[in-house]
Image: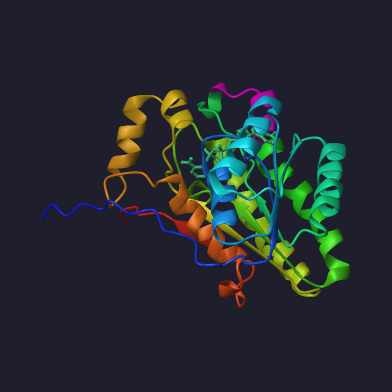
Amino acid sequence: MQDVKNNPEYVPGHGLLKGKSVLITAAAGVGIGFAAAKKSVEEGCRAIVISDIHEGRLQASVDKLKEETGLQNVWGKVCNVVVEEEVQELIAFAEEKLGGVDVLINNAGMGTSKLLIEMEDPEWNKVIDVTLNGTMRMTRHMMKVMKPRGTGVIVNNASVLGWRAQKEQAHYAAAKAGVMALTRCAALEAADFGVRINAVAPSLAVHPMLKKSAPEELLKELEGKEAFGRGAEVWEVANVMMFLASDYSSYMTGEILAVSAQRA
Ligand SMILES: NC(=O)c1ccc[n+]([C@@H]2O[C@H](COP(=O)([O-])OP(=O)(O)OC[C@H]3O[C@@H](n4cnc5c(N)ncnc54)[C@H](O)[C@@H]3O)[C@@H](O)[C@H]2O)c1
């Protein structure tokens, strides 16, 4: 095979979210969530609320976002998407600070690795509760708020594992398949009042936390399955989120876009 490198250059903003307000969950890490927050600002959003379960990292991320982008209309609010009251408080907070949320990015999701025959209920339930139920809670309450306005966009973060099989991932894959089904069904209901809901399904987005938590061998194996021989940069996934959040995707709802370079 010809040795062609696939080294993408960071894409500057093109005003895709000009004048919009954005709310993102699980955005205080070093992964897709924070990358999506930064991209949103670079794409011209006028104000943003970022949220996360981790209070210390959240404040640091608010400061970092302000510093790196220059936007001062940045707020942080702690929210564990598993807790119904915290979800409602987050949405009320964002509505007030932003004067209405135009774009919600549901990024929260978590996984572990465990063979199904060794899986106990608490581990199964936790992954489902954060990844699927958390997305459902955020979507449900955001739809209620967006409905009377007759406008708004929701972007969910699924995974190619919602379609594909991988050992030790039954809980996570089931949760992400659920996020895909939720996206399709909620989109159909939300279309009645002018709100669009789509999802990205990344295959592998490599970041420092993933490198720390996943065994090196597994990461190598997964990277080897990608046609480019590498995982995505987190901002490459965020780019596709920006497309789905923007008016460029105005005729799309209930769709799941794979952000993947996998071999067939
Ligand atoms: N990284 C990948 O290769 C990959 C691939 C496919 C899908 N995804 C999905 O992308 C999303 C982001 O993952 P990432 O790996 O880029 O990391 P990330 O940094 O974007 O997200 C991790 C953050 O989630 C927060 N979090 C964890 N539980 C939470 C909860 N209950 N409520 C609120 N916040 C919580 C953590 O504190 C952390 O800051 C997840 O939904 C993940 O399933 C990631």
Q: Nearer the viewer, residue 43 or 246?
A: 43
Measured as percent of width and height from the top left, residue 212 is found at 44, 24
Quadrant in the picture for residue 173: top right
Q: Is residue 61 left or right of residue 145?
A: left
Vertical side of 146 occupied by 235: above or below: above
Q: Is residue 49 left or right of residue 217?
A: right
**Which SS does the magenta portion mostly show?**
helix
How is the model colour-coded? rainbow
Residue at 57% x, 42% y: name it: 34
Residue 138 falls within the magenta-colored stretch: no
Measured as percent of width and height from the top left, residue 182 is found at 69, 56
Which residues lie in the magenta part?
Answer: 118-128
Vertical side of 262 occupied by 242: above or below: below
Q: Which of 66 and 153 is in front in this view?
A: 66
Determine the residue located farthest toward the bottom in the rendered image: 251
Whether residue 158 is visible here, answered yes or no, is no
Whether residue 46 is visible here, answered yes or no, is yes
Residue at 87% x, 48% y: name it: 92
| Ligand 1 placement by image quarter | top right
Quadrant occupied by the N terminus: bottom left
Quadrant in the picture for residue 207: top left
